[in-house]
Image: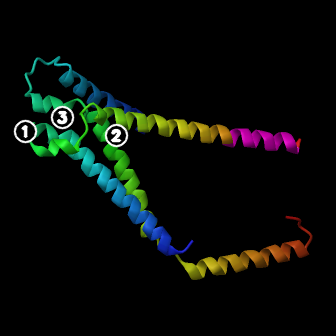
Amino acid sequence: MAKGTDQVVGLGLVALSLIIFTYYTAWVILLPFIDSQHVIHKYFLPRAYAIAIPLAAGLLLLLFVGIFITYVMLRNQKDTKKAQ
Amino acid sequence: MTKLAQWLWGLALLGSAWAALTLGALGLELPLSCREVLWPLPAYLLVSAGCYALGTVGYRVATFHDCEDAARELQSQIQEARADLTRRGLRF
């Protein structure tokens, strides 16, 4: 693969991680100290989602990892059965 | 003590400190904004650790020192070795 696409993908990942980090930090750490009448609260979901969304994402990730492992194991089993 | 034991010990200490503070077991009257910051703290640390990991992977991918010449040379050497071995009778 050419280094061009690698760079784009890499920098994209860095940018994504920075965006997520800044938004989440503002949500969890900064928002409680800002007056509840301020307009910035409009851009953030209710606080309960700050736990629910990462938790759901984490469970989804575990699900995909489990599915991938199962798929690879079944494929290996099938290959060894065919070889026998 | 093994590394795993050290990590578990540290996590247990931090976890119990967080639990004691959120459940008010120490009898401290923290202001409401501090409590609001405190209770999602484990999730926050996990998410920021994940972001750090993602960012590091992306950065290392973007700044990888690719050696095109060495790669091509290696590929031609592999072809050479394959031809040589098939000539000597090894089947791939």
Classify B72 as above or below B41.
below
Residue designated by label 2 = B46
- Quarter of the picture containing the C terminus of chain B is bottom right
Q: Nearer the viewer, mark 1 or mark 2?
A: 1
What SS does tag 2 mark? helix
Please state the chain letter of the residue tagged with numbered disc 1 in the rendered image: A
Q: Residue at x 92, y 70 (%)?
A: B89
Is A33 on the left or on the right of B9, as rendered? left
Numbered label tally: 3
Amino acid under label 2? Leu
Query: Which region shows up in magenta?
Result: A72-83
Q: Which mark is residue B37?
A: 3
x, y (%) of residue A40? 15, 46
Classify A14 as above or below B71.
above
Please state the chain letter of the residue tagged with numbered disc 2 in the rendered image: B
Tell me, yes or no, if residue B6 can be seen here: no
Residue B24, picture quadrant = top left
Q: What secondary structure do most residues of the magenta stretch adopt?
A: helix
Q: Earlier in the sequence, mark 3 or mark 2?
A: 3
Residue designated by label 1 = A35
x, y (%) of residue B83? 83, 77
